């Protein structure tokens, strides 16, 4: 039979508080959970201190007594009605008897009668929470009669405090990591209490030396009495019991959280715990000379005897150096990201899973006319996108991964429309799916693209018409010229003519030939502009050799030399036309009585071939080197040199179409070097020529 209620008042008070006690018990979460090594050690120490072979840690819930951990016997759950410790839970006071069989409260209890055990000497102290709830007991007993001293009961009470501290640590660790420092403080305080018990000294020391939380302790006079392993490593020193608290900060390198300001005595965590009763989550820095600083969070409290007298103070310090560094880095990254997004030219928007806007950057304000305050809390599709005709949600498509970069119509606050390029994708934030979107106004770009396409189409049509017109004009002009030349020859051969007539016929023939040459040049110019480029490897050695042979056959004393030239990808007829024009000009534009000398060389740089044609001709003045590329420009028209002013303009068109450049340089020793570039493999930026960005030119 269990404990009998002796007082109606006690029973009513107990029942009124029982629900709160049970709530507190379940909040600790220790029922039906295997006890850890520390709790087992406390129970072993309790047995040693009480001088008995058996001890147990009992917790009482609604219907049972749970023996969490035991010493000297195999523990098990039993009915609460059979519990001897019910009297302790009910009264909240320690109970100890020399012979339980002689005590009316326990004489009929199954733990005494032999049904469950034969308890005689019995001592039990309550496990009382800071709120006054008795969760159970720390119980020591013997099958023989035994007297318990006040010192033993006091020691058991202190161990009960240790147990509650360990319970508190477990609860705090389970609730949130933010209360980890408080849990460490509870454990440090529990260990401080246990340290007062001589029998637990070895176990306590082992615990202190194994944990990575620094523990520092002082006595009631403020004399440093204990540093554990972590504290010694961080401070680099052992505790100095003779050191005044005014010298703690200097000796042990204690600084405020800024890492630079030495801690004033009233701000030292151990001093505060001793004089104020407790300190919670105070952040300081231990900055030893020549060692990386250690940032710690301190939690501690004053330690008191059973009678309330001051024993000293204990502080637990947890290293948060890495955590704070990571937190600062995260904050810096967040500030950087915020700055980037706030200064971005594209609109940036974040929504929740329902499409409600949670972030709206300044570019979005400027693009759509809604301020951030107005936009946040409203649906993105309501603010920006007109109703889609297919009824499909952009967010639904993004959630399936089918929307990455699309162009969609949008609208501004004033109702005007625009076309935006939208990049929309899902991401996870704090366990919740969200969406982010970048929006770029491409209204003008798309309009320009349409205008360009239309212009290209019109240009293509105009070019086709120009080709037809050129062919028609060439035919219509060359036919009468051919007839004029033929009649002039017939007239010249028909009989004797006077000097005036012969001169006139010769002038007619020359004019017809010049007009035919100009028409041919115009046709070449048109073909250079519009003939499709069909690139193939062209052997420049062969091209130059063939043209040199033709020029030497047409004129005596012509010298044309070359280096070894590379094969280049080109339209063969067009590039041959360029070389023919350049070599022909080089041979033609020499001073009277001078034999033409021309040299062709090549240089390959960064995937580009530069062809250089150097002559000993009359040269081109610097201010004329840009002009000779204009159609019909003739630099030496009044010096007796024949030409149409079309050839070099045609060369420039051809080189431009191949992606290259053409320009003029003065030749060493006089004359002219005409240079042009052409890609040897693929189109890229051609190399800059000497003399800056002035346009290439030559004479025609």
Image (tube, grey):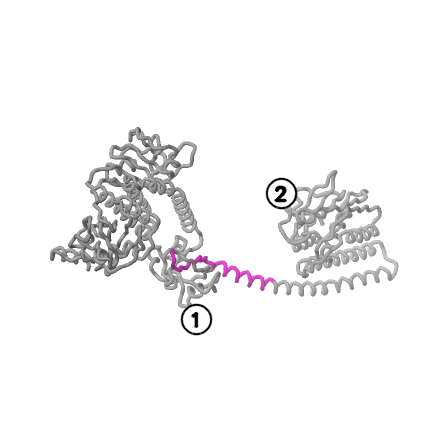
147 sits to left or right of 45: left
User: Relative to 317, does residue 391 appear above or below in the rendering?
Assistant: below
**Disc 2 on helix, strand or loop?**
loop
**Percent x, y for residue 476?**
72, 65
Extreme residue in the bottom direction: 390
Q: Going 77% across and 53% down the picture, which residue do you hit?
A: 543
**Percent x, y for residue 511?**
76, 56
Residue for badge 1: 390
Tell whether position 439 is magenta. yes
Upstream in sequence: badge 2 or badge 1: 1
User: Pointers 2 and 1 in contact (CB under 8 A)?
Assistant: no
Extreme residue in the front direction: 144
Give 363 or 553, whichever is nearer the viewer.
363
Residue 229 sits in quarter: top left
Give 503 or 284, whichever is nearer the viewer.
284
Q: What's drawn in magenta, residue-wise?
A: 430-459
**Percent x, y for residue 27?**
27, 55
Q: Quadrant of the N terminus?
A: bottom left
Give 334 or 512, whichever is nearer the viewer.
334
Q: Decide if residue 267 is in sight here.
A: no
Residue density around tag 1, few if under 14, some if 14–19, many if 20 or more, within 10 Å:
few
Give 36 or 688, whichever is nearer the viewer.
36
Residue for badge 2: 692
Tell whether position 468 is magenta. no
Give the total number of marks visible in the rendering: 2
């Amino acid at each position: 039979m269990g404990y009998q209620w002796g007082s109606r008042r006690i029973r009513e008070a107990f029942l009124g508080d029982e629900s709160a006690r049970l709530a507190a018990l379940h909040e600790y979460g220790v029922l039906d959970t295997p006890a850890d090594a520390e709790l087992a050690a406390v129970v072993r120490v309790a047995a040693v201190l009480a001088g008995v072979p058996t001890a147990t840690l009992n917790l009482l819930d609604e219907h049972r007594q749970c023996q969490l951990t035991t010493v000297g016997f195999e523990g098990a759950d039993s009915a609460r009605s059979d519990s001897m410790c019910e009297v302790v839970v009910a009264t909240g006071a320690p109970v100890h008897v020399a012979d339980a069989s002689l005590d009316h409260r326990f004489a009929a209890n199954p733990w005494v009668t032999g049904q469950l055990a034969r308890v005689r000497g019995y001592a039990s102290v309550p496990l009382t929470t800071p709120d006054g709830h008795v969760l159970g007991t720390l119980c020591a007993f013997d099958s023989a009669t035994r007297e318990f001293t006040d010192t033993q009961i006091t020691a058991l009470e202190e161990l009960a405090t240790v147990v509650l501290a360990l319970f508190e640590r477990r609860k705090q660790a389970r609730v949130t990591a933010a209360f980890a420092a408080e849990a460490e403080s509870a454990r440090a305080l529990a260990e401080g209490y246990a340290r007062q018990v001589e029998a637990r000294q070895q176990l306590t020391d082992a615990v202190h030396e194994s944990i990575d939380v620094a523990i520092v302790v002082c006595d009631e006079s403020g004399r440093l009495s204990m540093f554990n392993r972590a504290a010694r490593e961080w401070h680099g020193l052992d505790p100095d019991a003779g050191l005044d608290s005014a010298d703690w900060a200097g000796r042990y390198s204690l600084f405020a959280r800024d890492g630079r300001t030495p801690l004033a005595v009233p701000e030292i965590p151990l001093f505060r715990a001793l004089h104020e009763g407790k300190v919670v989550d105070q952040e300081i820095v231990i900055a030893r000379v020549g060692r990386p600083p250690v940032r710690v969070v301190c939690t501690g409290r004053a330690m008191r005897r059973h009678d309330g007298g001051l024993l000293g103070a204990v502080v637990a310090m947890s290293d948060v150096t890495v955590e704070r560094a990571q937190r600062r880095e995260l904050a810096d990254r967040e500030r950087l990201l915020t700055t980037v997004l706030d200064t971005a030219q594209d609109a940036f928007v974040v929504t929740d899973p329902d499409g409600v806007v949670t972030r709206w950057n300044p570019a979005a304000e400027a693009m759509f006319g809604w301020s951030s305050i107005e936009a946040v809390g409203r649906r993105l599709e309501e603010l920006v996108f007109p109703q889609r005709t297919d009824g499909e949600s952009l967010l639904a498509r993004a959630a399936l991964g089918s929307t990455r970069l699309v162009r969609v119509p949008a609208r501004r606050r004033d109702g005007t429309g625009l076309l935006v390029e939208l990049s929309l994708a899902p991401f996870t934030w704090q366990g919740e799916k969200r969406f982010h979107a970048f929006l770029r106004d491409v209204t003008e770009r798309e309009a320009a693209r349409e205008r360009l396409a239309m212009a290209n189409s019109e240009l293509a049509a105009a070019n086709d018409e120009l080709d037809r017109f050129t062919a028609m004009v060439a035919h219509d002009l060359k036919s009468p010229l051919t007839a004029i030349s033929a009649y002039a020859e017939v007239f010249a051969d028909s009989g004797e003519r006077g000097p005036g007539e012969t001169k006139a016929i010769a002038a007619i023939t020359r004019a017809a030939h010049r007009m035919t040459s100009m028409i041919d040049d115009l046709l070449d110019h048109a073909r250079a502009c519009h003939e499709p480029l069909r690139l193939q490897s062209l052997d420049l050695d062969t091209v130059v050799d063939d043209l040199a042979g033709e020029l030497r056959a047409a004129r005596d004393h012509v010298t044309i030399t070359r280096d070894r030239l590379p094969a280049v990808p080109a339209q063969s007829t067009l590039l041959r036309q360029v070389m023919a024009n350049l070599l022909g000009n080089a041979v033609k534009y020499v001073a009277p009585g001078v034999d033409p000398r021309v040299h062709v060389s090549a240089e390959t740089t960064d995937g580009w071939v530069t062809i250089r044609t150097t002559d000993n001709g009359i040269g081109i003045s610097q201010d004329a080197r840009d002009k000779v590329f204009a159609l019909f420009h003739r630099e030496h028209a009044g010096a007796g040199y024949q030409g149409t002013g079309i050839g070099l303009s045609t060369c420039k068109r051809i080189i431009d179409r191949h992606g290259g450049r053409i320009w003029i340089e003065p030749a060493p020793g006089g004359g002219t070097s005409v240079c042009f570039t052409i890609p040897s493999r693929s189109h890229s930026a051609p190399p800059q020529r000497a003399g800056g960005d002035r346009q290439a030119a030559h004479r025609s």
